[in-house]
Image: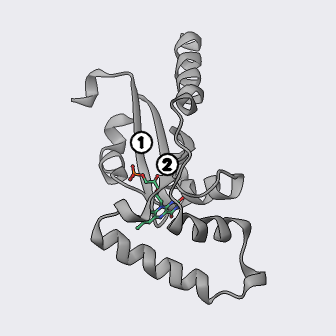
Amino acid sequence: MLKKYDTIIYGGSLHAVGIIGIKFIKKNFAKLMDKRLVVFATGASPASDEVIKEIVARNFTPEQQKHLKFFYLRGGFNYNKLPLFDKVLMTLLKWKLKTKKKEELTPDDIGMLEAYDKPVDFTRKSNIEEIVAYVNSCHYNAP
Ligand SMILES: Cc1cc2nc3c(=O)[nH]c(=O)nc-3n(C[C@H](O)[C@H](O)[C@H](O)COP(=O)(O)O)c2cc1C
């Protein structure tokens, strides 16, 4: 079905740095080589070069990285709305963070711990503008 499109944009949320559903794209990567491939991930972590580098490295081989453009969009986190299994996983993470000494906690750790009690939502419709601008610029530059 995707074969008829020139540009494929895939997005999924992060679970333990893995992009949900990315297996489908990776499995069909060879068939998508002639396409403009854009992948975005949403996650609770604040965006930083380090975070983005880790996501890209963990989800794509160096060869795959050459054939796609990646974006990271900060998502939200609402512990109370998680399915049971995810609640268990996130409770384990909370415990792990709580075993750290106070002075070892990074600002991101502190933000994450706070988000367990107070849901956060960084999603904004305008955040997709950078993706739209990228895709449009590719289109106009196309031979
Ligand atoms: C089990 C689990 C693991 C997660 N792992 C990460 C992670 O590694 N990095 C991150 O930034 N956010 C992580 N998150 C946060 C989600 O990616 C974030 O809340 C996202 O916005 C959820 O989007 P969705 O509701 O569309 O799935 C995790 C959330 C859960 C429940």
Picture disc at residue 11: 1
- Do the residues under discs 1 and 2 have CB atoms within 8 angstroms? yes
Q: Residue type at mark 1: give it.
A: Gly
Judged left or right of residue 126, residue 102 is: right
Asked where in the image residue 35 lies, by quadrant, the reply is: top left
The answer to whether residue 51 is visible is: yes
Judged left or right of residue 37, residue 53 is: right
* Residue at horizontal 49 percent and vertical 42 percent from the top: 40
Does ligand 1 reach within 8 Å of label 2's beta carbon? yes
* Residue at horizontal 35 percent and vertical 60 percent from the top: 81
Task: Determine the secondary structure under disc 2.
Answer: strand
The answer to whether residue 60 is visible is: no
Q: Nearer the viewer, residue 13 or 108?
A: 108
Of the 4 image quadrants, the one containing the N terminus is: top left
Quick check: 8 above or below 59?
Answer: above
Q: Which residue is mark 2?
A: 42
